[in-house]
Amino acid sequence: MAIHFFNEESNYKLKLKKELKQWLKAVAAEEGFKIAALNYILCSDEYLHQINVTYLQHDTFTDIITFDHSEKKDSIAGDIFLSTDRVIENAQSFKVSVSEEMCRVLVHGALHLMGYTDKSKATKLTMTTKENYYLAKRTFDGK
């Protein structure tokens, strides 16, 4: 059960890594999953844009891209790339703290690996409801 955090072309300093790992493991357990290996790669807009173009053929900026490497039905593994530039900008737009928006995006990526999608209005609502539920269950604020 390994969760790792990396930086690529981003100077963002993730706080409370131990607490984040415990929280993400608890989210997975409540959803009926174990975490085999999660790699969160915090990167710049440009870095994530290049991944989006190269691997998904989408010439757009995004806040997160998730690559699923899971091999077992009840276990999740993957690489989750997230733009710290987008997280900071979205936090300002949504009038929330950067740490709260970062937690939302971190759990969003994990939920993708658990089978949740956000491609339609209905699935996006389900995903947002799950995010809000798990954000409310945090025992830390990351500030």
Image: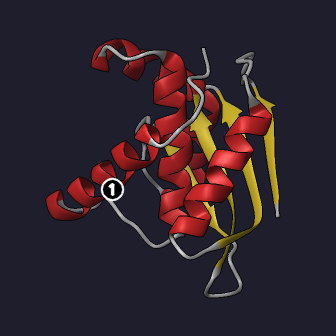
How many numbered tags mark residues here? Answer: 1
Q: Position of residue 125 (x, y in %)?
A: 21, 54
- The residue at 52%/70% (across/down) is 114
On screen, residue 102 versus residue 72, left or right, reads left
In the image, residue 46 above or below residue 63: above
On screen, residue 12 versus residue 113, left or right, reads right
Residue 115 can be seen, yes or no: yes
Mark 1 sits on what residue?
127
> Residue most toward the left?
121
Q: Residues within 10 Å of mark 1 (few under 14, many from 20)?
A: some
On screen, residue 41 versus residue 30, left or right, reads right
Q: Quadrant of the N terminus?
A: bottom right
- The residue at 47%/43% (across/down) is 137
Residue 53 can be seen, yes or no: no
- Depth order, front residue of 81/3: 3
Q: Position of residue 66 (x, y in %)?
A: 57, 56
Q: Position of residue 112 (x, y in %)?
A: 48, 62
- The residue at 62%/57% (across/down) is 26
Colouring mode (rainbow / by chain / secondary structure / one colour) = secondary structure
- Depth order, front residue of 68/133: 133
- Depth order, front residue of 68/27: 27
Q: Amino acid at mark 1?
A: Met
Q: Position of residue 138 (x, y in %)?
A: 53, 38
Splitting the image into 4 quarters, where does residue 69 fall? bottom right
The secondary structure type at the circle numbered 1 is helix
In the image, residue 120 above or below residue 96: below
Splitting the image into 4 quarters, where does residue 121 fall? bottom left
Q: Quadrant of the C terminus?
A: top right
